[in-house]
Amino acid sequence: MPTLILVRHGRSTANTSGVLAGRTPGVALDERGAAQAAALPGRLAELPISEIVTSPLQRCLETVGPLLDARPELRPHIEERISECDYGDWSGRKLAELTDEPLMQVVQAHPTAAAFPGGESMRAMQTRAAEAVREWNARVEAEHGADAVYLMCSHGDVIKSLVADALGLHLDLFQRVSVEPCSITAIRYTRLRPFLVRLGDTGDFASLVPREEPPSEEAAVGGGAGAP
């Protein structure tokens, strides 16, 4: 079965302003995010990518833009099921404001019970994304062979939930996974089990340097802005 390259979109204007973007339209890459996207073709130059699948949101389309320019033989496939979690009434709000919401404790510790007001549950997010991956695995294998490599550009919480699915982890554990902007996660699927072969790889270890202020113990809902 194919190998899936999961790319989180580059850093966005919402990431740097501390806003939970969700599906809010018009959220673009910031200057650093655009640079991250521009570097993506070089990082993936050795991979024979057969298909590019992307969330319909602007920040993902901008992230795969340079890669599509570098590989004019490919065209993007828009896949609604790997779009950002629908955070409903939380969308567009400052993350600092949401910290005191009782639901945030549920999102952190028991995400299978978390359903966003006016939006969707985290269970539904994982289910739709995993179904999309399995259908695309079958499609890519049928069209390009069992050793094919294809790419999906998606969002932090979606990618984390797919990693949990691949590892057989309960969704309640998915907040232990971290994927920075424009990071690459690779999952090789086989008939019997998936193998996680890369996780959140940015090629940059700056985020691991100790800081004066200790890192938060809370998971970054929506994925966070990455290393400063």
Image (cartoon, rainbow, N blue to C red):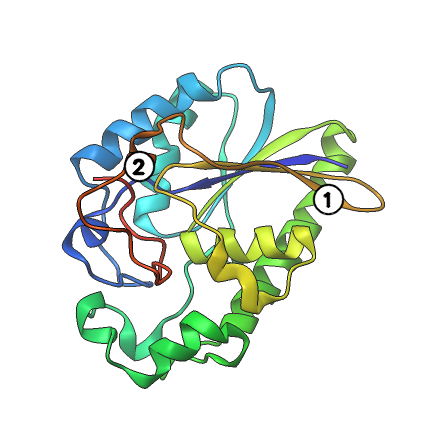
Residue bearing mark 1: 194
**Horizontal side of residue 72 vs 211, given as left or right:** right
Name the residue located 42 percent from the left edge and 51 percent from the top edge.
Answer: 155
Q: CA distance from mark 2 to mark 1?
A: 28 Å
Give x and y (percent) for residue 40: 39, 25
How many residues crowd around disc 1 within 10 Å: few (fewer than 14), some, or many (20 or more)? some
Image side of residue 85 versus residue 32, left or right: right
The residue sitting at 28% across, 75% down in the picture is 90
Q: Please rate how many residues cluster around mark 2, counting C-alpha atoms within 10 Å: few if below 14, some from 14 to 19, many from 20.
A: few
Quadrant in the picture for the N terminus? top right
Q: Amino acid at mark 2?
A: Ser
State the image coordinates of residue 138 (x, y, percent, origin top left).
75, 45
Question: Which residue occupies the foreground of this view, 143 or 1?
Answer: 1
Q: Which residue is mark 2?
A: 207
Query: In this orientation, which residue lies closer to the viewer: 227 or 37?
Result: 227
Which residue ends up furthest to the right in the rendered image? Answer: 192
Quadrant in the picture for residue 39: top left
- In the depicted structure, whether residue 107 falls above or below residue 200: below
Q: Which mark is residue 39?
A: none
The disc labelled 1 sits on which kind of residue?
Pro
Say if 87 sits above or below 225 in the image. Answer: below
Question: Residue 170 location in percent, x, y?
Answer: 63, 66
Residue 50 position, x and y percent, is: 61, 28
Which secondary structure, mark 1? strand
